[in-house]
């Protein structure tokens, strides 16, 4: 799979430039590392990308210089890129760059620039005698990232499919006497073995009463017969995240555990069935939520139904109840997100089932391929 | 080791309150997750802590509610804590909380609040008819965190010592024919085996020419005789980070590789020797840099000499050249940081040697305990 090709980057940049044009912005400062990667293929915790009227400018310090030079000699080179060294502070070099370009107005990513950093930009501009107006923007690059392109879909499909052999390995590791931490270690080694560069997030192995804690990770608890065990894991492949949850039973499940599982399973199936272009994300959430509410588990399902997957493990679209700060999204082909309803009963345990879906022209494609039946291990 | 006790948290909160008093702030909004953990023992990617005139308020959504309730029943409970549910947006609940408390002025962490979030606070305050003035602050909690308390030192010492058995395992895995990725997998499994909850950062296994890229991670390259291999890794124990680099040779090192190693070794030793209370961090950096410059490797050492270690893998104090945005720090007992000079020759390879040191009353204690001699594997 590897890195997206130069032509793919050109397409992404063109989409972002069109959006900037509608905002009346000729210059745009990108500081979110995932957005920088999306537009330039530059990977790193530092770096600033300036999308200018003509071409773009990548500001990097010496740690990344050699890697950028190598990238620019490949078929995945960032088009029209000028690389600028950052000898000291990124903020100084950014203002120097904007000054050299004679920029009067620059858009910036208001969600990815701290109040402190923004103040620093203004202070340096003043010191340098520059009159740059910084214009806050929201979701300029994120909006482009919601619809995955062919290279992204191929990588996400590959990443999700690789979780099947990982699940096979971890199912063999779940047995009475094992610690949660030991199962997590097996799981993370298996993620590496199938080629992931790292886990997408801290692996969750939550057993018995811990399974009722949706964001528990993995601890010293020893698995024992009758436990429900929530296994939530994923890996990063070429920068793209996969994310899967299966809940298993250690030995035969109790009738209560079986009932809980069946409810969550039905909720997840209903949400999956609801996915197709033109449907609102809140409808997908409601499909799952209505089933859990009808079974008296509305209160037991406190989180959202899903989240977008891509360069970030949590990105747009959010699949949740309607909320002022998380507006519903109309689903369109190329969107990729998780569907992961759960039900958590404090003191007893919990169940969550999670898969990754791609919205297609006709409906959906399930990217994860692990059976969703309740397993007794 | 486990979580810090309630009395320890009281001490930390008292230090922060003293600092807030000097700033004339009675209320303080903590949004940096590491700072929230430091002051409350609450671990999570979400949560807001409000330090109020009397007691403090932790805002968490349903995912974390049960975990917080359990914590509050232990000897590590956060003192004087009121827990407030977040049913929807954190920003709404925060403003509701500030309104209920009748707060007129609230400090906030300007480095950890985006321009977008800050605007949202102001908009919600206006909608609710509240007149809250948000006052930007810098380093209020970070300043307390620079000097580690007894619980933190014990955890950091334990974490650093556990890297020795990890290094033993990985040295056995370095041999011709192995891929960088396979060595990284062995390394991360070993981190788990000795009890770390996760790697502190993406493990680096950089071989041959890749070793000249300071921020390379691990790829498909196969190790071969004569390679220098930079192994940079660490684990998180009870939330605290360890960080170690060793550079090894696959088979006997060439004379050039030996010379490069000896230069970096001498630079690191000089920096370590410079550590004691009262010394400026820039002097520690200069001790390493002068040696590399004298050997014609000044240009080959592009990064800083070290960084603080604690709940974050990169925190204060920074040990680097004097820079406007990274002022020098006078070393004091209880500070913990890395010393990691390196030299990178594009096309040939690189060497970095990194250890973790604690500043003591008398000088320093080396927390990492792996031999620093060049190994031929």
Image (spheres, coloured by chain):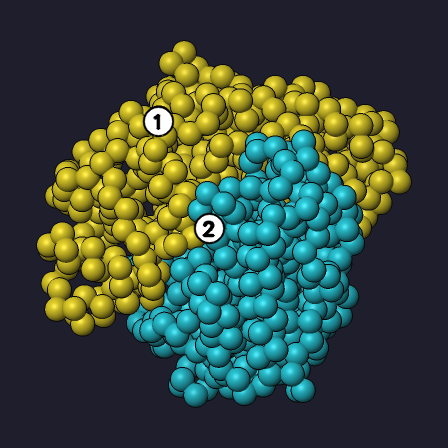
Chain colours: A yellow, B cyan
Residue B376 shows in the view = yes
Q: Position of residue A220 (x, y in %)?
A: 80, 50
Disc 1: which residue? A75
Q: Is residue B367 above or below residue A138?
A: below
The Cα atoms of the two marked residues, 1 and 2, are separated by 25 Å
Count of numbered badges drawn on the protein: 2
User: Of A151 and B356, which appears nearest the observer?
Assistant: B356
Q: Position of residue B83 (x, y in %)?
A: 58, 64
**Do tags 1 and 2 sit on the same chain?**
no
User: In this rendering, would A327 be left or right of B209?
Assistant: left
Q: Is residue B268 above or below residue A94?
A: below
User: Of B275 and A356, which appears nearest the observer?
Assistant: B275
* Residue under the image location 70 percent in, 69 percent down: B367
Q: Please state the chain letter of the residue tagged with numbered disc 2 in the rendered image.
A: B
Residue B98 shows in the view = no
User: In this rendering, would B340 be left or right of B102?
Assistant: right
Of all residues, the one furthest to the top in this rendering is A362
Q: Tag on residue B345?
A: 2
User: In this rendering, would A377 be left or right of B89?
Assistant: right
Q: Dot 1, crowdedness within 10 Å: few (<14), some or many (≥20)?
A: few
Q: Position of residue A243 (x, y in %)?
A: 57, 33
* Residue under the image location 12 percent in, 69 percent down: A129
* Residue under the image location 59 percent in, 68 percent down: B266
Of all residues, the one furthest to the front in this rendering is B255
Q: Is residue A78 above or below residue B9?
A: above
Q: Please state the chain letter of the residue tagged with numbered disc 1 in the rendered image.
A: A
Cβ atoms at labels 1 and 2 below 8 Å apart: no
Q: Position of residue B192 (x, y in %)?
A: 73, 47
- Quarter of the picture containing the C terminus of chain A is top right
User: In this rendering, would A49 be left or right of B88?
Assistant: left
SS assignment at label 1: loop
* Residue under the image location 67 percent in, 56 percent down: B374
């Amino acid at each position: 799979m590897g890195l997206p090709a130069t032509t793919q980057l050109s397409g992404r940049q063109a989409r972002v430039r069109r959006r900037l044009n509608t905002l009346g912005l000729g210059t745009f400062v990108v500081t979110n590392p995932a957005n920088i990667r999306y537009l330039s293929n530059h990977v790193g915790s530092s770096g600033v990308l300036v999308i200018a009227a003509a071409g773009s400018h990548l500001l990097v310090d010496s740690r990344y210089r050699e890697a950028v030079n190598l990238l620019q000699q490949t078929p995945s080179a960032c088009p029209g890129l000028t690389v600028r060294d950052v000898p000291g502070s990124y903020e100084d070099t950014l203002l120097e760059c904007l000054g050299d370009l004679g920029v009067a107005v620059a858009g910036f990513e208001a969600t990815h620039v701290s109040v402190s950093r923004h103040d620093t930009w203004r202070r340096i501009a003043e010191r340098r005698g520059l009159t740059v107006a910084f214009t806050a923007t929201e979701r300029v690059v994120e909006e482009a990232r919601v619809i995955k392109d062919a290279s992204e879909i191929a990588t996400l499909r590959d990443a999700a499919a690789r979780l099947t052999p990982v699940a096979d390995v971890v199912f063999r590791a779940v047995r009475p006497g094992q610690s949660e931490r030991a199962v997590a270690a097996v799981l993370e080694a298996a993620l590496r073995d199938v080629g992931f560069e790292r886990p997408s997030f801290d692996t969750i192995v939550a057993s018995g009463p811990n399974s009722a804690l949706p964001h528990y990770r993995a601890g010293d608890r020893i698995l024992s017969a009758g436990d429900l065990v929530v296994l939530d894991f994923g890996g990063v492949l070429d920068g793209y995240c996969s994310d899967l949850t299966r809940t298993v039973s250690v030995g035969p499940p109790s009738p209560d555990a079986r009932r809980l599982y069946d409810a969550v399973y039905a909720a997840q199936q209903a949400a999956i069935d609801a996915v197709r272009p033109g449907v609102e994300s809140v409808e997908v959430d409601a499909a799952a939520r209505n089933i859990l509410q009808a079974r008296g588990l509305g209160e037991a399902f406190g989180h959202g139904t899903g989240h977008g997957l891509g360069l970030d493990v949590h990105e747009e679209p959010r699949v949740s109840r309607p909320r002022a700060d998380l507006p519903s999204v109309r689903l369109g082909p190329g969107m990729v997100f998780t569907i992961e309803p759960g039900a958590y009963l404090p003191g007893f345990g919990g169940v969550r089932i999670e898969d990754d879906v791609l919205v297609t022209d006709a409906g959906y494609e399930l990217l994860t391929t692990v059976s969703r039946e309740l397993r007794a291990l």
